Amino acid sequence: MSADARQLLIAGSGFAGTWAALAAARALAQAGREADIAITVISPAPQLHIRPRLYETAFDEMAPDIAPLLAAVGVAHQAGRVETIDTVRRELALVAADGERTTRRYDKLVLATGSELNRPPVSGLLEHAFDVDQLAGARKLDAHLHALAARPANAARDTVVVVGGGFTGIETAAEMPARLRAILGANARTRVVVIEQSASIGPDLGPGPRPTIEQALAACGVEAVTGLAVTAIDADGITTTDGSHYPSNTVVWTAGARASALAAQIPGGHDAHGRVRADRFLHAAECADVFVTGDTAHAATDEAGNVAMMSCQHALGLGRVAGYNAAAELLETPLHPYSQPKYVTCLDLGPWGAVYTEGWERTVLMSGAEAKALKRSINTEWIYPPPADREAAFALAAPDHVIVP
């Protein structure tokens, strides 16, 4: 690497950040320009956290080490957290784990810092609710659930309330009855309730899979309460907008996500989730040297008006395109427009199985055990990073790689 190499920085090592790094490295290798441009991924640790699996308990499988993979393709990793972005000076302020502060200048920046759980000002939320948004939170919830076995049996101990009946809430709730019985014993009077403020469970999933979801939740032993919001949480339960109180020592908050707070530091328009509005090449609309990707990007997936979801499915494609285009601009070669027209969902429904849909209208094509086998493959194979092999990684890192055939 030459001393005056131009700097391509990627903030974040999640799905989008990892694939942005691989796609950028591939572009440099194909152009024979690896000595001219330095690629660095900045994140607290060289790990890809498998957030779609955090409703499960196989925690040792949920943060694979990507250091060997990055090294294999010639990408550096810098341990630290981006605190501020100065888009005028093209400079990042970083904080290391020991508190040391440094700065890094960039020629191109890929913002891939993901999203975080939305925590509105609900009384008691910060003090009493658990979550499965990050690995540390999922571990904390699991430790709490196991500690319940030492408490006297009562309605609050034996009840889990999941707040939010969207994708994560449904998957978390569907797993919970069996999880509780394994901890508290088959004779415990366990109860799992999912609270959704919309009129129907899974409002963003549409009517297509709803009968399957409702059937599965009932079969798993989950009560679905709709049309109510949570107004307060305490150590012994929740209160809803109709004044009802549900006793529970375990409230799991899953109600919505927002783009990383760093997205707000990028000039230009932002959507209701805080995502930066991107052009077809994933430039931040008003900041030419910044590319946004994954959960920080509001990007059209097709010509029909659909916009990328905050999901690993879209992050995988967004990452590839953003990384490639950041490298391509430095190489002064043509950019690749982002396009991901096929959309599918595969929702885990606990011991009952799963449901698989295709299209934005979410037409159900598979359910039960068959869909569960597909979900297991997705969760344990498809979304994991490739092996630390340069050619194998580059074979999957093209910007036009089809995520869902």
Image: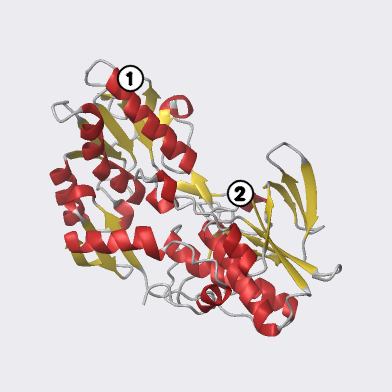
- Residue 315 can be seen, yes or no: yes
| SS category of the residue bearing label 2 | loop
| SS category of the residue bearing label 1 | loop
Say whether disc 2 or disc 1 marks the residue closer to the N-terminus. 2
Question: Which residue does the numbered mark 1 point to in the structure image?
Answer: 236
Task: Indicate which label's residue lies in the foreground, 2 or 1.
Answer: 2
Q: Position of residue 338 (x, y in %)?
A: 53, 75
Q: Position of residue 203 (x, y in %)?
A: 30, 52
Is 215 located above or below residue 300 in the figure?
Answer: above
Q: What residue type is labelled 2?
A: Ala
Q: Residue at x 13, y 45 (%)?
A: 219
The quadrant of the picture occupied by the C terminus is: bottom left
The outermost residue toward the right is 4
- Residue 250 can be seen, yes or no: no
Question: Which residue does the numbered mark 2 point to in the structure image?
Answer: 45
Q: Residue at x 39, y 30 (%)?
A: 143
The quadrant of the picture occupied by the N terminus is: bottom right
